[in-house]
Image (tube, helix red, strand yellow):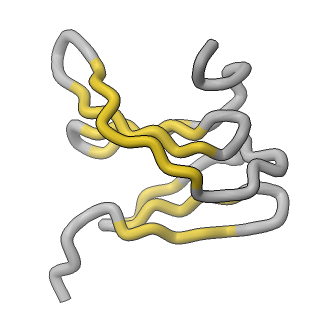
């Protein structure tokens, strides 16, 4: 499997899916009714046990591995 062994978390917001592989690479997909298209790949964390669940709070995506916790803005800042 090109996205790891299948232990990585994912979360969906509107027409976007965020998926993290076993090495903590974050993949961004655009979803439609019939398919998913990869639109970005980012190395965010070190990948030390990066299988914990993700969370979305408003326009922020929260990710963690065994050593780090990060919060990424994923939408437009309206403040």
The quarter holding residue 20 reads top right
**Is residue 25 or residue 76 the one in the foreground?**
25
> Residue at 28% of width from left, 24% of height from top?
37
Q: Residue at image x 50%, y 37%?
A: 19
Position in image of residue 36 (x %, y %): 29, 21
Is residue 47 visible in the rendered image? The answer is yes
Relative to residue 47, is residue 30 drawn left or right? Answer: left
Give the image location of residue 32, x and y in percent.
18, 22
User: What residue is drawn where x is 74% and y is 46%?
Assistant: 50
Is residue 75 found left or right of 45 in the rendered image? left
Up/down of 76 relative to 18, above or below = below
In front of the other: 67 or 14: 67
* Number of callouts: 0
Is there any visible trace of residue 11 in the rendered image?
Answer: no
- Above or below: residue 78 compared with residue 49: below
Locate residue 15 relative to residue 66 in the image: left or right.
Answer: left
Residue positioned 45% across, 68% down in the render: 72
Q: Position of residue 38 (x, y in %)?
A: 34, 29
Quadrant containing the C terminus is bottom left
Residue lying at the far bottom in this picture: please name it: 79
Give the quarter of the image for residue 9.
top right
Q: Nearer the viewer, residue 19 or 53?
A: 19
At which x and y percent is residue 75?
A: 25, 64
- Split into 4 quadrants, where in the image is the N terminus? top right
């Amino acid at each position: 499997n090109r996205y790891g062994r299948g232990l990585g978390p994912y979360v969906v917001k509107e027409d976007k899916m965020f998926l993290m592989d076993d090495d903590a690479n974050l993949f961004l997909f655009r979803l439609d009714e019939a398919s998913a298209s990869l639109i970005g790949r980012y190395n965010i964390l070190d990948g030390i046990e990066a299988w914990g669940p993700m969370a979305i709070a408003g326009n922020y995506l929260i990710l963690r591995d065994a050593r780090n916790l990060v919060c990424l803005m994923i939408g437009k800042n309206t403040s």
